[in-house]
Amino acid sequence: MKEAIEAYFNEELGWIKDAELREKAVEAWRIALEESDFQPEDLEKLPFTLFERRAQTTLGNHVKLVTRIAYQAAKAMNEALFEEQDCLNMDYVVCGALLHDVGKVLEYTRLADGTVVKSLKGRLLRHPISGAQVARDAGLPDQVQHMIWTHSKEGNGQYRTPESYVVMHADFMTFDVLE
């Protein structure tokens, strides 16, 4: 499974310079997928949202797009605003974006007829919560867990790191554009 995850997110994982952080990101996806009803290849089939009013893309495409947008935005901000040194931690931005919806594979389940619906776990713990738990179990730093936890409405009114703001806005850009 690890090899399939690495192959699927190959380009995005390559943007994480810290090898240990990169390995832990793969481990988080492995943990979530093994606990779920899904396999890595299902990332290209699962909807990114169960809201019917939204145009659909796959969960995998959504995660890749959010990661690409967050990476490019953070890179541009570091280049334009912070001449002396990078203010935004690029590895955290990429890792947080890559994992922001890792909990969705736990939030979803597949019925016998193939329909994807919200799982019991998903009704009890939305994906930012279960995703942050998966990140903790994978040994990821608090900063990455924080980005997963705060990327959605659960983060409203909470402190957000600058990296979390970048990931949250990249996610909402893609979410809102598809409405």
Image (tube, grey):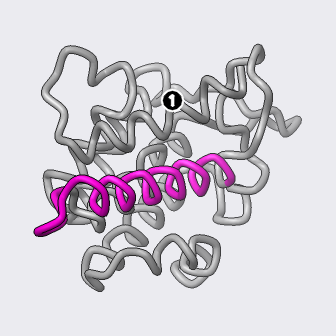
Residue at x 84% of width, y 39% of height: 114
Left or right, 67 with reference to 124: right
Residue 128 sits above or below residue 35 on the image = above
In this picture, which residue range is highlighted in magenta? 61-87
- For the residue pair 27 and 7, the one nearer the viewer reads as 7
Residue at x 55% of width, y 45% of height: 105
Q: Residue furthest right?
A: 113
The C terminus appears in which quarter of the rendering? top right
The N terminus appears in which quarter of the rendering? bottom right
Q: Which residue is mark 1?
A: 172
Magenta-drawn stretch, dominant element (helix, strand or loop)? helix
Residue at x 81% of width, y 33% of height: 115
Question: Within 10 Å of the Cα at label 1, are there few (<14), some (14-19), or many (20+) other Cα atoms?
Answer: some
Picture quadrant where residue 41 is located? bottom right
Q: Type of residue at label 1?
A: Phe
Left or right, 156 with reference to 142: right
- For the residue pair 52 and 125, the one nearer the viewer reads as 52
User: Under tag 1, what secondary structure?
Assistant: helix
Residue 33 position, x and y percent, is 53, 58
Residue 36 sits above or below residue 41 on the image = above
Magenta residue check for 54: no
Residue 167 position, x and y percent, is 38, 43
Residue 93 position, x and y percent, is 32, 56
Residue at x 54% of width, y 79% of height: 6
